Image: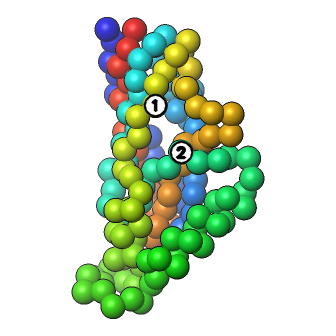
Amino acid sequence: MKQSVHKLEITTRGQGLYEFTSEVETWLRAQQIHTGLLTVFCRHTSASLLIQENADPSVRRDLKSYFSRIAPENGPYEHTDEGPDDMPAHLKTALTQVQLSIPIANGSLVLGTWQGIYLFEHRTHPHRRQIVLHVIGE
């Protein structure tokens, strides 16, 4: 059994979905794990992770629009220390996830044809986000 850990940094330009599947696949190939499990973890409370369709960009636009409606800026929030997008970002993260588990078979991620791994940035301003990858397998 082998394990490995790696940190990725993703620079965002503000709210939206940022695919980083290819970066994960490149790192995974170098680990030479044939069968195992990959954990992807986001080290933030105002950004999250999604496995989502990567073929049609309208899916990403619709997701962003939907989450803006259910957690609007300038709502009746008590927590507003970092601006009007602060608490909505926390709500959006709570409704999604900060950790993904993806099986590995034949040395590759077991993702569907149209699936990609995304960082979902919930803050308005650009950020540098840290993602931790942990793989275990043989």
What residue is disc 1 on?
102
The answer to whether residue 55 is above or below residue 32 is: below
Residue at 51% in and 71% down: 67
Residue at 33% in and 56% down: 44
User: Dot 2: what SS?
Assistant: strand
Pick the front one: 116 or 14: 116
Pick the front one: 96 or 3: 96
Residue 123 horizontal/vertical position (percent): 45, 70
> Disc number at residue 73?
none
- Badge 2 crowding class, 10 Å Cα cut-off, few under 14, some 14 to 19, many 20 or more, is some
Residue 106 horizontal/vertical position (percent): 55, 12
Residue at 66% in and 65% down: 61
Amino acid type shown at disc 1: Ile
Q: Would residue 30 be seen by someone viewing this image from the given angle?
A: no
Whether residue 89 sits left or right of residue 119 in the image: it is left
Q: Are marks 1 and 2 in contact (CB under 8 Å)?
A: yes
What residue is disc 2 on?
51
Amino acid type shown at disc 2: Ile
Pick the front one: 119 or 71: 71
Please state, as top left, top right, bottom left or bottom right, where the C terminus lies in the image.
top left
Give whichever of discs 1 and 2 has the lower sequence position. Answer: 2
